[in-house]
Each structure stands twice: as structure tokens, then as C-alpha cells.
């Protein structure tokens, strides 16, 4: 488990103070895939770099299972174990970092070294024999499906293959945690899907805890169990991925969710007169979100029939989030005022989320 408590990190930039991480507290459970999403400058990369102390927090604490609690205090790092506090030594910091692998957007491979040597690099500075290094690298090549690329150079690899090498290198010392900082942002859609599938596979096979930083809600939807939404250095919303998709609360979360399912285009479609769906005094435009079993419910036809209202589907979308269906409709609802009121009440009572489209 990784428990982050009241973490703070401030930078001085052009004579201005930037609060990159502002009182962030989250808990990441062992073996889960935890996503952190936000726009550029939200503080998500700074947060993840604080977990392995590539960035030193100004204040707060991070507890890592099997290691202890590291407290940031006035520019110093204090290690708390078994109720005792001592300054965190360089040796202890190195041990902590070995337990946490990390991959980046741009791979950071050694161009003049083969795939084998890139993966072996972190092991060469530990007390491993050549045969131990060879055996471990061969295991990792098999794990990331690059056995046939053992002796080639990075320039001969695709972007997805380079990221596989980076993943293998990050796992060389058998870490319990893998930090992924925008690991798919430089990849094409096919390579992105392939890398996400690999990460999910590693999570299941190795029990690996993965912390995934991204600005793409589609990535979160594809792979994460929990997600934290960051804005201006703060976590503004956090929870199970399915719950956030089904019922986003904050404006930024609503924008991310809308961007991932296409229904966010409704306002542009109306403005461009691509759809004839302009709300009037007798016609409402509403968004319906169907969760779990309600996705398969014949609600639209039943409501139209029982309440004598017209429901016209303008846009529709069905997703699988955490292998569970999540459906969304944008519909025109019209009819007598009392009938519309009763129809909306019935829809809500049926477990379907109802929102007006602004």
C-alpha cells in the first residue's frame, strides 16, 4: 500500500511561487492500477515523482508497505519505522527507489546499447553475476514479448517496442510498484492499446501495483481500478473508475468523461445545426446515464408508452468500464408538463441518472 498524506510541493518559477502539489492525500492499495488524470500543469507528474522522491516534497508524508513512512519536514526526509524516527539515509533512499520502477513518455533508452544491454543496465551496478544478469534479462524479454529483439538497437524499434524495453528495464530489480508517467502519450492508438494490455497483464501476473499518470480518460477507462482527478495541484475528485464515469461530480471530471464517450460533442452539434435538438418551452434535452443492469432495460419505450411523452434519441453511447456496461443517451423529451414531470421521476426511480444538457 502507498498512503500519501497532506503532500505539498512548491516551485519558484520566474519569481512566482507555483503550488504544484497542494495538500494531496490518497491511498493506493497493493496490486491495484491507480490512475491520476489532469490537464497539463495540474501537478500529476510532480505528485508521481514525489512517490519515489525524484522530487522531494516540502511537507507531508508517504507510507510504503514494507519500507516505512517517509516524512518531509523543512527540507529534510525523516524515516519512521516501528515508532522510531531517523533521518532517511542515502542507502535507505536507494533501497526505496529500487522497490519502485518508473517509465516515462519518451522511453529514455541508451541509443548505443542493445535491447539486452538497456534492460541489463540497472543490474550491472548491483552484485549480480553475469549469468544471473543474463537469466534475468531473458526472463524480462519473454515477459514483454521481445525475445526476438534481444540484440537490436533502439533505432530499429517501433515506439511501442521501445516502451516495452523501458518497462522491462524498470522491472529488472523486481519492484513492487511501477510508476507510469504519460507512458502512452507518444504512441499511436495500436501501440497504446498494446502497452495498456501489457501493463494489465503484468498487474495480474506479478501482483504489480501500478500508478498511471495520464491526460487521457480513455486510458483510465481501459486499465485503471481507481482514479484521482487533479486540478491546480489538488485532487478534486477520487474514487472507483466506474463510479466516476457513471456520476462525475466536478466540472473537470465531467469534461474528461464527456471527451471519452463522444456525447460531449452535443453542444457543438447543436451550434452547427448538425442535429435538430434545440430545447424549447415544450421540449427538453436531457442526458440519461444507465448503470450496470439498467443498461439492458427497455426504459425508453416503456416511459413513452406509460406516460404519454415523446422520447427521441439524439446521441447514444455504450462503454465497458471495469468490464461492466455503462450506457449514455441524449434524448429529446416532450409532452404535457405533468406527464414530463412524472416521466422524469420514474426514470430517476429506475436507477438512471438524469441531467439537463446545457
Image (cartoon, rainbow, N blue to C red):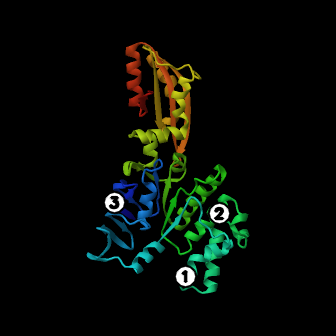
Looking at the image, residue 327 sits to the left or right of residue 345; the answer is right
Seen from the viewer's position, the closer of residues 122 and 305 is 122
Comes first in the chain, label 3 or label 2? 3
Seen from the viewer's position, the closer of residues 59 and 143 is 59
Q: Is residue 164 visible?
A: yes
Looking at the image, residue 347 sits to the left or right of residue 165; the answer is left
| Residue situated furthest front in the rendering | 15
Across and down, in percent, residue 72 comes to 32, 67
- Residue pointed to by mark 1: 125
Mark 3 → mark 2, Cα distance in angstroms: 33 Å
Across and down, in percent, residue 83 comes to 26, 75
Asked whether disc 1 touches disc 2, contact meaning CB atoms under 8 Å apart, the reply is: no
Looking at the image, residue 325 sits to the left or right of residue 56; the answer is right
Q: Which mark is residue 162?
A: 2
- Residue pointed to by mark 3: 7
Residue at point 41%, 18% (across, down): 340
Amino acid at each position: 500500500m502507498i498512503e500519501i498524506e497532506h503532500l505539498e510541493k512548491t516551485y519558484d518559477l520566474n519569481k512566482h511561487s507555483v503550488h504544484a502539489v497542494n495538500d494531496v492525500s490518497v491511498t493506493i492499495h497493493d496490486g491495484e492500477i491507480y490512475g491520476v488524470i489532469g490537464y497539463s500543469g495540474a501537478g500529476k507528474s510532480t505528485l508521481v515523482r514525489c512517490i519515489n522522491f525524484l522530487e522531494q516534497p516540502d511537507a507531508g508524508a508517504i507510507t510504503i508497505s514494507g519500507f516505512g513512512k517517509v516524512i518531509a519536514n523543512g527540507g529534510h526526509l525523516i524515516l519512521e519505522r516501528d515508532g522510531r524516527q531517523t533521518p532517511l539515509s542515502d542507502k535507505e533512499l536507494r533501497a526505496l527507489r529500487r522497490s519502485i520502477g518508473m517509465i516515462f513518455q519518451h522511453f529514455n533508452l541508451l541509443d548505443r546499447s542493445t535491447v539486452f544491454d538497456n534492460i541489463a543496465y540497472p543490474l550491472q551496478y548491483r552484485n549480480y553475476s553475469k549469468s544471473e544478469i543474463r537469466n534475468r534479462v531473458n526472463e524480462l524479454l519473454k515477459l514483454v514479448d521481445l525475445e526476438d529483439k534481444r540484440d537490436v538497437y533502439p533505432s530499429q524499434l517501433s515506439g511501442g517496442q521501445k516502451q516495452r524495453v523501458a518497462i522491462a528495464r524498470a522491472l529488472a530489480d523486481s519492484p513492487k510498484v511501477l510508476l507510469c508517467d504519460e507512458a502512452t502519450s507518444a504512441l499511436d492508438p495500436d501501440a497504446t492499446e498494446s502497452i495498456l494490455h501489457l501493463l494489465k497483464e503484468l498487474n495480474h501476473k506479478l501482483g504489480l501495483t501500478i500508478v498511471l499518470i495520464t491526460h487521457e480518460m480513455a486510458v483510465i477507462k481501459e486499465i485503471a481500478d481507481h482514479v484521482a482527478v487533479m486540478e491546480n495541484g489538488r485532487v478534486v475528485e477520487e474514487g472507483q473508475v466506474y463510479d466516476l464515469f457513471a456520476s462525475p461530480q466536478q466540472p473537470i471530471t465531467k469534461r474528461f468523461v464527456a471527451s471519452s464517450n463522444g456525447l460531449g460533442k452535443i453542444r457543438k452539434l447543436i451550434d452547427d445545426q448538425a442535429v435538430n435538438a434545440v430545447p424549447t418551452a415544450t421540449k427538453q434535452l436531457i442526458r440519461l446515464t444507465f448503470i450496470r443492469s439498467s443498461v439492458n432495460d427497455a426504459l425508453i419505450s416503456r416511459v413513452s408508452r406509460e406516460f404519454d411523452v415523446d422520447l427521441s434519441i439524439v446521441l447514444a453511447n455504450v462503454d465497458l468500464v471495469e468490464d461492466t456496461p455503462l450506457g449514455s443517451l441524449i434524448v429529446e423529451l416532450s409532452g404535457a408538463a405533468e406527464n414530463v414531470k412524472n416521466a422524469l421521476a420514474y426514470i430517476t426511480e429506475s436507477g438512471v441518472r438524469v441531467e439537463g444538457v446545457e
